[in-house]
Amino acid sequence: MAHDTPPTGVALIELFESCGALRRGHFRLSSGLHSPAYVQCALLLEQPQRARAMGRALAERLRAHRVESVLSPALGGVVIGHETASALGVPFRFAERGEGGAMTLRRGFALRPSERVAVVEDVVTTGKSTRETAELAKGSGAQVVAIGSILDRSGGRNGFEVPYEALAALDLPAYSGESCPLCAAGGVAEKPGSRPG
């Protein structure tokens, strides 16, 4: 991959497949939904030059929103959030789940009132953790001005209230366990993700 021209769109999907970050089969996603494909951005980002290129590309999409800092949900958004913030020349922070499972700022991180924040994630499927991170920022008095991700798997159903920038979209079906045709055909879903259960 050329360092100055990171792939987007179809070329990025091909890169996902070539580095093993996009797998085909029968999977149970961290959302609980079942899908015939699974995306593991950590494999895309394990090469620092690819992570930097993705961060630069996403920063270019977010620059027009006059972002003053980047906030990402841990753990999936940490690498791409940091690289995006680096390319924008702004501070980076991450949110993590605290007791009770709510997103929280820890480790001394804080947001200023009215700070213009972009929430950056690796992959958006349901958008749940991204929305929770945005709500945390708003609850801290910051202004969420944009959301960005490497990959949009939401099919336009993310429910975001601010502009959303993604480097590529991959509209793959996702099913509840009860309505999954792969399960109905006798398949057993693999749980490859980073979250337990």
Image: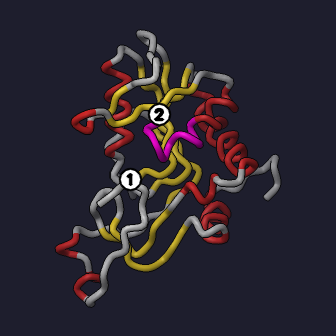
Q: Residue furthest bottom?
A: 185
Q: Residue 122 placed where, x, y %?
A: 51, 48
Q: Per the image, is 77 magenta?
A: yes
x 59%, y 42%: residue: 80
Residue 190, located in which quarter of the rendered image?
A: bottom left
Q: Which residue is mark 1?
A: 156
Q: Tell me the kind of residue under disc 2.
A: Val
x 33%, y 36%: residue: 97
x 38%, y 24%: residue: 137
Q: Residues within 10 Å of mark 1 (few under 14, many from 20)?
A: few
Q: Per the image, is 142 magenta?
A: no
x 34%, y 26%: residue: 136
Quarter holding the C terminus is bottom left
Q: How is the image coloured?
A: secondary structure
State the extent of the magenta-drawn residues as a range: 72-81
Q: Residue 138 placed where, x, y %?
A: 34, 21
Q: Residues within 10 Å of mark 2 (few under 14, many from 20)?
A: many
Q: Which mark is residue 193?
A: none
Q: Tell me the kind of residue under disc 1.
A: Gly
Q: Which residue is mark 2?
A: 119
Left-right relation of 24 to 140: right
Element at badge 2? strand
- Mark 2 vs mark 1, foreground winner is 2
Disc 2 from disc 1: Cα separation: 17 Å
Element at badge 1? loop
